[in-house]
Image (tube, grey):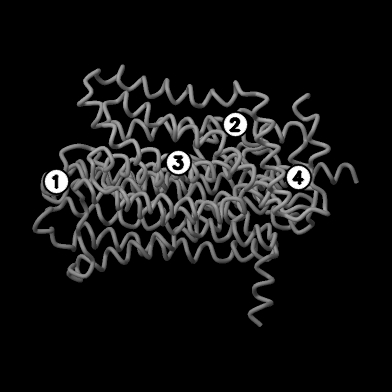
């Protein structure tokens, strides 16, 4: 039973139809969570005794950072599956992920540096987590650059899939080495708000925002996926109905 | 209300962050919809071309 | 054209074992490279020039240069190895030898590993020999030379392997220099971090074994995984 479900996920028309039906659910629930999270984070949560109202940036910074990693992992896994089992839909998923992930990585970098300004007095310090995010941003740029430089669509899919897999293997290595490098030099590190010590009024909006961003990623992915699937299906008859409206 | 907007003196940082977040989300939504519209247009064109040949 | 004259005879066919084929490829690559000795010198000259840029840009005072020496040496090494990647697959891709390798039925992974080893012997190892000279010019004490040679020798293994994947991915792309850097440099940053740290400790006269072991671990990881990824990438690029 599970196997037929998996098989159907490899079929472009099935996935396309699924995407059309599921997008509104993800989109609206995401909007709900994000609005509630923002309200909770900006209004209801008490000011942090150390950082004052500045800490409220966490409610956009942390979800963005979470997005940057989650999207890259999704991209790499679907690229690997597409490469090994030669499933076009998976390559479409990977292609759809990249711009989403890159934009939220940039968001995480900028909000991180805005948050750090208060503590550092400058807009950038080589904080280990921000440095790792920066390198992740370069990995996204490389992936998108490779894709756009190969003309043949199928070759672009497969070459960038190899790159995504190589990248995802390197992400933990890069993260470890940056943490190691930073610990040697005792550079000031920001963002020490630890989740376990947060009161519920602070933690709940954060969890809502994390959930909301994840749901939003699903919605965005499904819309982009439809576009990517269409561009890969040249002579299929099912497209006729899909684009008729 | 003005205290809320002031964010304890960190207004610039907090509101720029949320503002940027809104911009990135909007960019993603618009980008996704444009990609879909472009792909649909492309597919329609190709179907029309094949329809003429057949 | 003349450089590929011997290639038709030397591509190992189905009768040869993978290891033998790899050995033959290694020997062939080294022999061919020595016909164009001028090309081998270019990355080293680049390394020397880049190292010279920093004193000119910062200060002639050796005490200041000694402080930045680890970073300068390793950034220069990274950039020269990037330049040297040109020579890894380009000639073989252009004259069709790489396609012959893919079609020969031999293990492409082993063949590419052999090519990367040859590449390291021709570019990475000489870099490890040159690095101490550059270091001395930056005010580094003579006692640090051993540590510098060791770290650059091991680090350049990792760099050649990481670079081979990037070079394989960009085989079909024209003017791929900037793209190749974009792909390879982020993946090479751990090598830079550990290598520079090892160099820094060597300069201070402290034990530099821990980062050296980490460099070794990266090199081993590269040896096991990079040729596989490169082989997949070559197949994709040539299809």
Q: Chain of mark 1?
A: B
Closer to us: mark 1 or mark 3? 3
Q: Which residue is mark 3?
A: C153
Nearest the viewer among C63 and C145 is C145
Q: Chain of mark 3?
A: C
Contact (Cβ within 8 Å) of mark 3 with mark 4 = no
Extreme-right residue of the structure: B54
User: In this rendering, would A79 be left or right of B21?
Assistant: right
Across and down, in percent, residue C20 comes to 72, 51
Task: Evaluate whether residue A223 shows in this view.
Answer: no
Closer to us: mark 4 or mark 1? 4
Residue at 8%, 58% in the rendered image = A49
User: In this rendering, would A14 be left or right of C51?
Assistant: right
Nearest the viewer among C54 and A47 is C54
What whole-number distance in Å separates the C-alpha atoms at marks 2 and 1?
56 Å
Residue at 49%, 46% in the rendered image = C158
Q: Which residue is mark 2?
A: C86
- Judged from the image, the secondary structure of the residue bearing numbered disc 1 is helix
> Residue C196, which numbered label?
none
Nearest the viewer among C231 and C116 is C116
């Amino acid at each position: 039973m599970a196997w037929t479900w998996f098989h159907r996920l490899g079929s472009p028309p099935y996935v396309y139809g699924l995407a059309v039906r599921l997008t509104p659910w993800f989109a609206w629930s995401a909007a709900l969570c994000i609005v509630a999270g923002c309200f909770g984070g900006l209004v209801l949560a008490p000011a942090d005794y150390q950082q004052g109202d500045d800490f409220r940036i966490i409610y956009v910074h942390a979800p963005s950072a979470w997005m940057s990693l989650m999207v890259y992992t999704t991209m790499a896994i679907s690229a690997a599956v597409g490469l090994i089992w030669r499933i076009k839909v998976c390559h479409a998923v990977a292609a759809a992920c990249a711009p989403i992930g890159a934009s939220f990585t940039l968001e995480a970098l900028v909000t991180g540096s805005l948050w750090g300004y208060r503590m550092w007095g400058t807009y950038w310090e080589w904080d280990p987590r921000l440095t790792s995010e920066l390198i992740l941003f370069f990995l996204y740029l490389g992936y998108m650059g490779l894709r756009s430089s190969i003309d043949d669509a199928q070759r672009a899919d497969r070459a960038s899939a190899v790159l995504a897999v190589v990248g995802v293997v390197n992400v933990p290595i890069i993260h470890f080495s940056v943490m190691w490098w930073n610990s040697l030099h005792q550079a000031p590190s920001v963002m020490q708000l630890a989740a376990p010590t947060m009161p519920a009024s602070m933690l709940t909006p954060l969890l809502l925002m994390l959930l909301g961003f994840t749901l939003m990623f699903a919605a965005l992915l499904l819309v982009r996926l439809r576009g990517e699937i269409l561009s890969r299906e040249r002579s299929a008859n099912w497209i006729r109905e899909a684009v008729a409206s | 209300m003005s205290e809320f907007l002031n964010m304890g003196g960190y207004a610039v940082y907090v509101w720029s962050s949320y503002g940027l977040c809104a911009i990135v989300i909007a960019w993603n939504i618009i980008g996704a919809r444009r990609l879909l519209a472009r792909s649909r247009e492309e597919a329609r064109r190709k179907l029309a071309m094949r329809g003429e040949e057949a | 054209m003349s450089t590929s004259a011997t290639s038709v005879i030397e591509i190992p066919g189905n009768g040869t074992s993978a290891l033998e084929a790899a050995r033959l490829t290694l020997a062939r690559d080294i022999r061919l490279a020595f016909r164009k000795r001028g090309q081998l010198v270019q990355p080293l000259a680049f390394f020397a020039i880049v190292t010279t840029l920093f004193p000119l840009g910062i200060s002639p005072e050796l005490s200041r240069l000694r402080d930045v020496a680890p970073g300068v040496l390793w950034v220069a090494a990274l950039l020269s190895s990037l330049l040297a990647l040109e020579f890894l697959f380009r000639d073989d891709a252009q004259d069709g030898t790489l396609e012959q390798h893919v079609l020969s039925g031999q293990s492409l992974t082993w063949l590419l590993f052999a090519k990367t080893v040859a590449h390291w012997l021709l570019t990475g190892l000489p870099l490890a020999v040159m690095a101490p000279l550059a270091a001395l010019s930056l005010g580094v004490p003579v006692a640090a030379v051993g540590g510098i040679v060791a770290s650059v020798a091991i680090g350049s293994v990792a760099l050649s392997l990481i670079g081979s994947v990037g070079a394989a991915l960009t085989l079909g792309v024209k003017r791929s220099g900037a793209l190749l850097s974009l792909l390879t440099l982020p993946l090479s940053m751990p090598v830079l971090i550990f290598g520079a740290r090892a160099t820094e400790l060597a300069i201070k006269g402290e034990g530099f074994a821990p980062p050296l072991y980490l460099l070794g671990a990266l090199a081993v990881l590269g040896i096991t995984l990079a040729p596989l990824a490169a082989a997949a990438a070559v197949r994709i690029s040539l299809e």
